[in-house]
Amino acid sequence: MNSLEFSFAGARLRAMGSGALWWPENDLLCVSDLHLGKSSRVVRRGGPALPPYDNRETLSRLAADLDTTGAKTVVCLGDSFDDLEASETLSDADRLEISALQAGRLWIWIEGNHDPGPVALSGTHLAEWSQDVLVFRHIAEPDAQGEVSGHFHPKVRLNARGRMISRPAFLFDGCRLIMPAYGTYTGGLRSSDTALSQLMRPDARAILTGPQPQLTAMPR
């Protein structure tokens, strides 16, 4: 498995190279900010045409991660769709793919700021959800403990063997864990941005996604 094991709030977790979070003890896979339907939403609002393959690619990676882990619980941590209309106009093929991924699993849709939850799809729809020592919500809250959130799409830029690299990244400290965006067409916010540097504690660390997940101090 392409992942890096780490400890957070007493839980042993694995940051996967794809941007998914795997919690082996609970057979739980968490992904954040899929932003399905972004290409169609951009066109619908008068933006440039993007290749309409983002849903297919994102769902294919999710299917691969589910095959690898055998997860019995899936938490989609908000902004699963780029807006509510994107979930309502999902193609039949994509709808069938999601249904196939959900089969035999507890599937939890957490509400995001882009979508209030894809209510037309099966699964459990919640504002937040707790499991053992962790609480899952879309946007980080003040004074959180054991919180897993998304929303910010964190990215890390650093010098690796003489060249600068930039990758989506997990950020975590003793209180909170912020997930990278999982969607194909999602952008990112540098960890040095004020919104993240003020939110995370001074001892925060980052795990870069990619072929070999890499642990480093969170760049500020």
Image (spheres, rainbow, N blue to C red):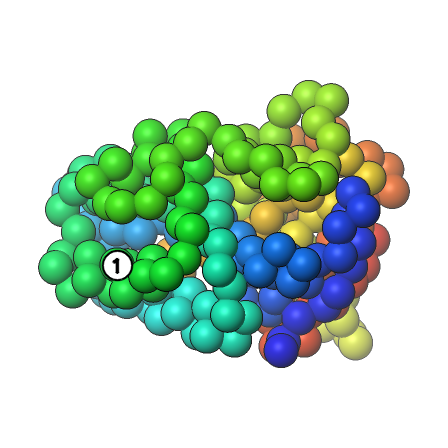
Q: Position of residue 139 (x, y in %)?
A: 54, 31
Judge left or right: residue 213 versus residue 44: right
Q: Position of residue 33 (x, y in %)?
A: 44, 47
Q: Position of residue 145 (x, y in %)?
A: 74, 31
> Where's the C terminus, which quadrant?
top right
Figure quadrant of residue 132: top right
Judge left or right: residue 50 versus residue 65: left
**Residue 92, can we see it?**
yes
Residue found at the very far right of the displayed protein = 203
Q: Residues within 10 Å of mark 1 (few under 14, many from 20)?
A: some
Residue occupying image coordinates x 42% and y 32%: 126
Type of amino acid under label 1 = Ser
Looking at this view, is 65 or 104 the one in front? Answer: 104
Residue occupying image coordinates x 81% and y 35%: 201
Judge left or right: residue 8 versus residue 87: right
Q: Which residue is mark 1?
A: 99
Looking at this view, is 131 or 201 the one in front? Answer: 131
Judge left or right: residue 53 versus residue 113: left
**Residue 55, can we see it?**
no
Secondary element at tag 1: helix
Residue found at the very far front of the displayed protein = 104
Q: Is residue 209 above or below residue 196?
A: below
Figure quadrant of residue 21: bottom right
Q: Position of residue 181 (x, y in %)?
A: 50, 51
Residue occupying image coordinates x 53% and y 53%: 30
> Where's the N terminus, which quadrant?
bottom right
Across the whole image, how many numbered discs are drawn on residues? 1
Q: Is residue 78 above or below residue 37?
A: above
